[in-house]
Amino acid sequence: MRTVDPDKHRARRRHIIESAVPLFATKGLDGTTTAEICAAAGMSSGNVFHYFSSKRDIFQAVFVEYDDLQQQVDDALASDDPWEALLGFVGQLAAPAAEPYVPALVLEAMLQATRDPDLLATLERQGRDEDTALARLVARCVDAGEVDPDLDVEHAASWINTLVGALFLRAATTEVFDPAVELATLRRLVKRFLGGERS
């Protein structure tokens, strides 16, 4: 019986995902064929579907296997500066909006989620995890006396995440919008919203 090398298996899956991302972003899930994914990955259909059960499975894997939220949260919570940890974490959540294909891919995921309960559950879980992480970081800032102590921490976290989501949506739908430039604006908006006193 052949032994599976987990690192090689993971690398092959990632290669297929990365090959499919530009197709999903530009043509949508429904407009992308399995043949196009195979051609982009330089693999046969049998090889591709050894790693994934379907085209939809590849699409959903984009949002699962690229999720490094827990590491980002751990790094932020380990910081000695609660305020900069929060702003840095917001920046990490928003930074992919400046990457090619990502905003369009997120928009496609939102559209697909309206008729795919599994994908909807994945996106909702990720949103809840982000809200929870943001709430923990906002709470640290409140405890440190650096933001408005009267804010409802969970409500504030939800609104911060809504601002981050709006950045992706605007980047996907407005050609002249430059998310890389607007990351600084997002940071200012979060600071004003929380009532932080530090510049």
Image (cartoon, rainbow, N blue to C red):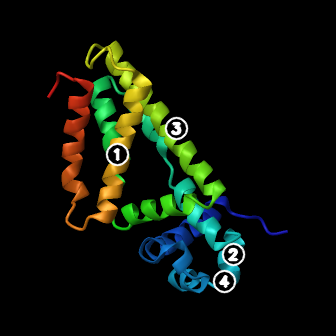
User: Which is nearer the eye, 4 or 60?
Assistant: 60
State the residue at coordinates (55%, 80%). 37
Amino acid under label 4? Ser
Label 3 or label 2, whichever lies nearer to me, is 3
Label 4 or label 1, whichever lies nearer to me, is 1
Amino acid under label 3? Asp
Q: Which residue is mark 1?
A: 164
Q: Is residue 80 left or right of residue 54?
A: left
The alpha-carbon separation of the residues under discs 4 and 1 comes to: 37 Å
Label 4: few (<14), some or many (≥20) within 10 Å? some
Amino acid under label 2? Phe
Tell me the quarter of the picture where residue 81 sits.
top left
Q: Which residue is mark 2?
A: 49
Residue 168 seen in this snapshot: yes
State the residue at coordinates (50%, 62%). 111
Q: Which residue is mark 3?
A: 129
**Quadrant of image for the N terminus:** bottom right
Label 2: few (<14), some or many (≥20) within 10 Å? some
- Disc on the earlier residue, 3 or 4: 4
- Disc on the earlier residue, 1 or 2: 2
- Disc on the earlier residue, 4 or 1: 4
User: Which is nearer the eye, 72 or 177?
Assistant: 177
The alpha-carbon separation of the residues under discs 3 and 2 comes to: 30 Å
- Is there CB contact under 8 Å for labels 4 and 2? yes
The alpha-carbon separation of the residues under discs 3 and 4 comes to: 35 Å
Label 3: few (<14), some or many (≥20) within 10 Å? some
Residue farthest toward the right in the current orientation of the protein: 1
Q: Which residue is mark 4?
A: 45
